[in-house]
Amino acid sequence: MNLKIAVLAGDGIGPEIMDQALKVTRAVCKRFNHEATFTEAITGACAIDAVGDPYPPETHQVCMAADAVLFGAIGHPKYDNNPNAPIRPEQGLLRMRKQLGLYGNIRPVMTFPSLIHKSPLRADLVEGADFVCIRELTGGMYFGRPQGRSEDGNTAYDTCVYTREEIERILHLAYRFARQRRKKLTVVDKANVIATSRLWRQIAQEMAPQYPDIETDYLFVDNAAMRIIQWPRSFDVLVTENLFGDILTDEASVITGSLGMLPSASIGIHTSLFEPIHGSYPQAAGKNIANPVAMILSAALMFEYAFNLHEEGAAIRQAVNASLEAGIVTEEIAEGGKAYTTSEVGDWVSEYIDSKKK
């Protein structure tokens, strides 16, 4: 198979971790006899610096022409620390999601046996946790209008808007995932307070009979946040709106013990995108110390969701698990043992995949 992949490394540690994901992708293609074409493009703070636009039209064209997008991270302190900056890297990310139609963010939450002790939660709570968070990505407060600040600067406002089409689309996606897993879907909202949440719950209740093989339950977002910590094994597939999903998925990441371990997929109308859930970590940029595993596992999701190549995705996960068991890890999770560099981890995982070639 010929795989056309857009490569958006972005800012901070993005270029370093992207290099490792590309090494691994090339190793998988070599092992399974695929051809891959990589086309690089700029986005985020580096794009603002280069052309004054965090998501230039040229970058959008590269993404539209590709079969999948591998995305690193965006963000830079000079924008984070300036709330009045007229152009921000995050504006490019939101525009990319909207223009590519990336309506569903898929974040698997799982544990790695060798890292259970890294979670701030007790081992008996997190061991065996394995669920998927599905976050609606193109609606809600992040995109609602009107939005702004008063002329005197003392009042700010955001508008949360959802349509039936947006809600039905993400719920159908969530039900499809639940059907492939343990057949349980939890719809998270705040229907006791928020009008858009009441629409979410109404539509979910209307749709549930279409999926009689799936157990559907409902949680208010505050209760869901508590249960993710108290009883993470109770979840299978969790679906929610944009803002709630942003918060809950970051909370859920502590179950694994490290933000540097979790990948994500953004499924869309046009080209789907695959990225780690962590940020640009500018303090580590250029030091070759960042954990590349989440970026590497995002490449595994790309093989599975963009190309329907599940054996290839499994090969990456097998190699990552082997690297963890062998202690081939960066300083973030080394805990006093030998810490390997970003590139050494990428090399080890790539060589492991290559060594298993039939």
Image (tube, rainbow, N blue to C red):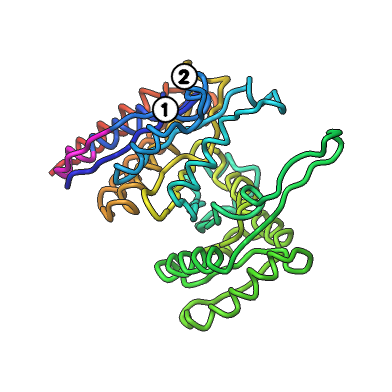
Residue range in magenta is: 28-38
Q: Amino acid at mark 1?
A: Ile
Q: Depth check: 127 or 263 in front?
A: 263
Please identify, in this view, whether the residue under mark 2 or under mark 1 is nearer the observer. 2
Rendered residue at 49%/46% (across/down): 97
**Disc 2 vs disc 1: Cβ atoms closer than 8 Å?**
yes
Q: Is disc 2 placed on a helix, strand or loop?
A: helix
Give me the disc on residue 33. none
Residue 331 among those drawn in magenta: no
Q: Is residue 223 above or below residue 87?
A: below
Residue 339: where, in percent of width, then height? 46, 22
Residue 131: where, in percent of width, then height? 51, 58
Residue 343: where, in percent of width, then height? 37, 23
Identify residue for label 1: 42
Residue lying furthest top: 287
Q: Is residue 257 above or below residue 12?
A: below
Q: Is disc 1 placed on a helix, strand or loop?
A: loop
Q: Is residue 204 above or below residue 226?
A: below
- Kindly tell me whether residue 124 is visible in this rendering: no
**Side of 182 relative to 163 (left or right):** left
Rendered residue at 29%/30% (across/down): 23
Give me the disc on residue 50. 2
Q: Quadrant of the C terminus?
A: top left
**Side of 288 relative to 238 (left or right):** left
Residue 234 found in image quarter: bottom right
- Kindly tell me whether residue 293 is visible in this rendering: yes
Q: Depth check: 285 or 155 in front?
A: 155
Residue 274 found in image quarter: top left
